[in-house]
Image (spheres, coloured by chain):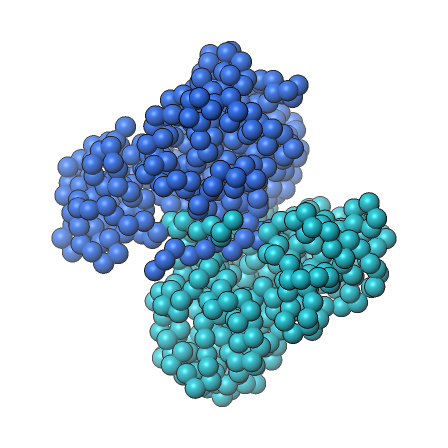
Chain colours: A blue, B cyan
Amino acid sequence: MTAPILSCSRRLRRTPFSDGVEAAGVKGYTVYNRMLLPTVFDSIEADYHHLKHHVQVWDVSCERQVELRGPDAGRLMQMLTPRDLRGMTAGQCFYVPIVDETGGMLNDPVAVKLAEDRWWISIADSDLLLWVKGVAHGYRLDVLIDEPDVSPLAVQGPKADELMARVFGDSIRDLRFFRFSVYDFEGCDVVIARSGYSKQGGFEIYVQGSELGMPIWTALFAAGEDIQVRAGCPNGIERVEAGLLSYGNDMTAHNTPHECGLGRFCNTHTAIGCIGRDALLRVAKEGPVQQIRAISIAGDPVPGCDRVWPLYARDMRVGQVTSAAWSPDFGTNVAIGMVRMTHWDAGTELRIDVRGEDRAATVQPAFWL
Amino acid sequence: MTAPILSCSRRLRRTPFSDGVEAAGVKGYTVYNRMLLPTVFDSIEADYHHLKHHVQVWDVSCERQVELRGPDAGRLMQMLTPRDLRGMTAGQCFYVPIVDETGGMLNDPVAVKLAEDRWWISIADSDLLLWVKGVAHGYRLDVLIDEPDVSPLAVQGPKADELMARVFGDSIRDLRFFRFSVYDFEGCDVVIARSGYSKQGGFEIYVQGSELGMPIWTALFAAGEDIQVRAGCPNGIERVEAGLLSYGNDMTAHNTPHECGLGRFCNTHTAIGCIGRDALLRVAKEGPVQQIRAISIAGDPVPGCDRVWPLYARDMRVGQVTSAAWSPDFGTNVAIGMVRMTHWDAGTELRIDVRGEDRAATVQPAFWL
């Protein structure tokens, strides 16, 4: 079957950068938080090599922000996550699992602490806004919650520091990982963090105000012509090699943070007030019975992983793969899977059903980076 | 620009009917509630003519259910909507605007009352589950909330009664509009309602259990060969002619039900407990300042409406169109717009900016059906 086309409508929201993305020749999209997210410009493999050697500008506007503002903002933020936020200062970004009352993952966003009473939650693919609004309403908290007009633009790749320094000044080279600061762009204050959904290094620019979108986009491309700057997007090969999980693909509301290998972000004993605390204390005590693992799949390049691929030990189902790609750099099919504890040790040989084809799969000691 | 392809991944969920949809030659998708929703099989215009003359089977699994079960289910349901639910009996379906504390629309689903303590909310495109869970948690209600394995399959078109009677028995012809009953399929109980997202008549089968999906799909096609049954989907022309609104396209959380022309579903004086009641009492008193209208657009067939098209009176912006299509049966471009009260009277002549092209537009007295 040929790839289906995407029928566009207002409901699949365009972004402040969509005109630039289209002019750059985007070939495919996915839909993320009801917004267009590019998936390929040249080819996924060509995009991958370029990302690892040069610098790319990514329209990740779909990482929408949930803004919490008011006296109860900090209290509410701690209710949402089992990560202890007491040591967090304004200017920091924390990766925070968000859980419901049973400890099920509702999102895995990055929390950006702008001030004691003002936070952004930079969300993965679920309407976290509705959970936060419902909880705040039910608890009668003194906090305003909305989705502001803020659209992240990522600059990723080994030449990201060079490109960003040319546009925002040399001081940006000193920005530490998962810290943000405010920089000037043509007289406007812009929040920029050292972060991003790749392991190639880089930044995320929180573009406040859609009208600022194309000017920043254009400035980055103008400044980077000689260093081969290109439009790009989160790369389906690179992120699996690096073990960057994708909410909705590799984990859902059925999974606890511990199953996702995110136990280190759960300070369940000290994160007082977290809604899922009771359930997660139980999980922390017993340990998860399944967990995310790096998996290699033998044979020729696998097709796109558009559904769960079951993992077997003999005839017993012991897990599933939810993301997979052929890695040119590592010469194997790399994958992210959820494996039961009986079979999750590194080196365990399994079988996998790849769309009806039986293949050998091996649990890896770590991701490929 | 050629139409972009949709990059599929597990996150864009397949449905129990996806294999059938693909075998029927689906050409395009949209993504709705993070699930695949077909948009075209032959061409949108050919699909339109077929829908109006024959019968189609639609995979609308993306109308996910939010299930409320427990002693507080009824109380919670009334908290969610300004529609008075006291007269509703088990076996009925109600179209219910869902609003937040400011009266903003969070969804426009159909509520299905299975029993006093058990409801399904058959949702439009937003994660209503998270709002309902957040509210229930905050108010400490005694109710279980989840998304069950229930996938609606619609049978729409003038021959829908004939096809359904052949598969589920003649008694289904007696089912009244927006009522449901339980029918037998190969020994399984199946909930079927007379409802659907077209004005051509028909049913929605709430398929409980994914494994039942393809058997029902196959039975419908086998039974309808001689009456030209085909795979179809909500049709972008027919639904605009009929004025069937689409959440995310024609209205968002910024709009009140009254702006959407849904004031008749707001019994704000009697719907005691509704979360948005205070705000909506104010709206009901003052009336909305803008409202949904049928709009005709002059000239050749318009392109796809993938973003807001502004409406003007002279140089003043007075509204916007959010859905539009060329109607073969009515010989004009039909559209759904939101128009300010100063210019919403039938017959008002406006200008519209259709992707940079200036066209004449006229406010219609009613939709085309």
Question: Residue A277 appears at what percent x and percent y?
Answer: 44, 36
Residue appearing at x 42%, y 22% in the figure: A227
The quadrant where residue A235 appears? top left
Query: x%, y% of residue B37?
Result: 48, 60
* Residue B271 seen from this side: no
**Relative vertical location of residue A188 with respect to residue A34 in this rendering, above or below:** above
Q: What residue sits 20% from the left and 39% below the top?
A: A332
Q: In which quarter of the image is the N terminus of chain A?
A: bottom left
Q: Position of residue A295 (x, y in %)?
A: 23, 40
Q: Image check: A220 left or right of B319?
A: left
Could you tell me which quadrant the C terminus of chain A lies in? top left
| Depth order, front residue of B189/A362 | A362
Q: How many marks?
A: 0
| A242 relative to A176, above or below | below
Residue for point 52% across, 39% down = A23
Q: Where is residue A254 in the image (x, y as percent from the top left)?
A: 39, 47
Q: Classify residue B75 as left or right of residue A253.
A: right
Answer whether residue A170 is visible to the viewer in this image: yes
Q: In which quarter of the image is residue A269?
A: top left
Residue A37 or residue A337, whichever sits in front: A37
> Which residue occupies the foreground of this view, B286 or A27?
A27
What residue appears at the point 67 percent right and 62 percent down from the top-left corner? Answer: B300
